[in-house]
Amino acid sequence: MANNRNAPCSCGSKQKFKKCCGNPATLAVKRREDNEKFIAQVQAKAAEREKADAEAKKAGKNTRPLSPLMAAAMMAAVLYPLDGGGRLR
Ligand SMILES: [Zn+2]
């Protein structure tokens, strides 16, 4: 592929690729935002499930065990907590 770092970025920002999605700092921010979005989703789901399980327990029902995927996702949320401070390094 030809060098198109000076071409307009394909994301529609009207900036040059090298200043937009081709910029490592931009990529790092985007990746962090994606991570945070994912973690927030997982945390919301986990909280929902915890609530549902607590209610099921109260009602005397058997609770479902945590799926390995959910357990791993919760672990990730603990290991990579949201700092909200824009820390990149
Ligand atoms: Zn872009």
Image (cartoon, rainbow, N blue to C red):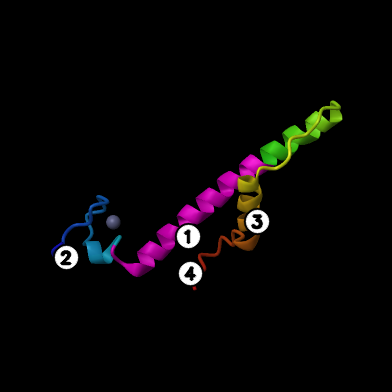
Q: Which residue is mark 2?
A: 6
* Element type where label 3 sits in the image: helix
Q: Earlier in the sequence, mark 4 or mark 2?
A: 2
CA gap, disc 4 to disc 3?
Answer: 21 Å
Name the side, left or right, on which 27 lies relative to 41.
Answer: left
> On the rendered structure, is 84 left or right of 33?
right
Query: From mark 2 to mark 1, how far is it between C-alphas?
Result: 25 Å
Residue type marked 2: Asn
Left or right of 61 on screen, residue 43: left
The residue that mark 3 highlights is 75
The amino acid type found where label 3 is placed reads Met
Residue 27 in percent (x, y) is at 37, 63
Task: Tell me the distance, in whole angstroms, between the alpha carbons under discs 3 and 2.
Answer: 41 Å
Q: Residue at x 19, y 65 (%)?
A: 5
Residues under numbered marks 4 and 3 in contact, where contact means CB atoms less than 8 Å apart: no
Helix, strand or loop for disc 2: loop
